[in-house]
Image (cartoon, coloured by chain):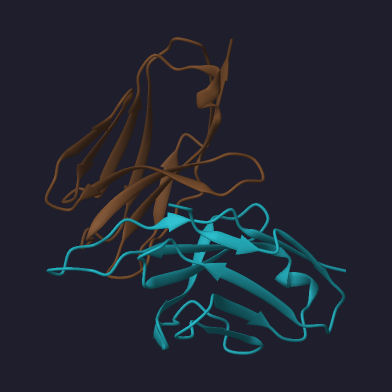
Chain colours: A cyan, B brown
Amino acid sequence: NAGVMQNPRHLVRRRGQEARLRCSPMKGHSHVYWYRQLPEEGLKFMVYLQKENIIDESGMPKERFSAEFPKEGPSILRIQQVVRGDSAAYFCASSPPTSGGTYNEQFFGPGTRLTVL
Amino acid sequence: KQEVTQIPAALSVPEGENLVLNCSFTDSAIYNLQWFRQDPGKGLTSLLLIQSSQREQTSGRLNASLDKSSGRSTLYIAASQPGDSATYLCAPSGYSTLTFGKGTMLLVSP
């Protein structure tokens, strides 16, 4: 069973360009989470999605950032008009469907390291 | 708002030592708590998951305890090895989100 896959692993963009980060969850997992790790800071939650639904986007910046998890294909985190402060490692995690209200372990991908020049 | 503190921030020990990493969190209304390790430039590897109803969880040389009411968790590493060198992250969970501390950077020297 392949783990969580993210691509690209490294992405370089100039200020004002768009960045698209992709995440394929583990097989059988229907929940996807995005986290951001800024230099010298801890990981911060951004958004939680299930297929075709955004469940919690409380950690997502209000402007320029969007996320989707379509019925088919990977989850996409999109950053429009990138600025230098967006330079960070972006991690995706996935978990299986919940059952009986129990919490399921999150499994993380290797991350995408975004550098904005 | 959940806040997580990990002590110490960094730890350097000789191989073979037993060690304890500490984690405290401000909101005790958690579902569960996960411990991860992160190697430089890499992703996170899940080490242990403690359900909120559990007091501890063991995997090999690792043992994690949870005292939900006092907002504390500890990760005990027995007989440390150079391969254990990494940053260890504690993350209590709300319904859908993990809140991370800044981690403890561990260096185990041969």
- Residue sitting at 40 percent across and 53 percent down? B4
Question: Is residue A11 shown to the viewer in this render?
Answer: yes
- Residue B38 position, x and y percent, is 54, 42
Residue B1, quarter of the rendered image: bottom left
Figure check: B62 above or below A43: above
- Residue A101 position, x and y percent, is 15, 69
- Residue sitting at 35 percent across and 65 percent down? A28
Q: Nearer the viewer, residue B100 or A34?
A: A34
- Residue B20 position, x and y percent, is 36, 26
Figure check: B29 above or below B69: below
A21 vs A106, left or right, is right
Question: Is residue A90 shown to the viewer in this render?
Answer: no
Locate the C terminus of chain A and report the quarter of the image it occupies.
bottom right
- Residue sitting at 32 percent across and 53 percent down? B25
- Tell me how many marks there are: 0
- Residue sitting at 23 percent across and 69 percent down? A98
A79 vs B76, left or right, is right
A61 vs B92, left or right, is right
A79 vs A105, left or right, is right
Figure check: B6 above or below B99: above
- Residue B60 position, x and y percent, is 31, 25
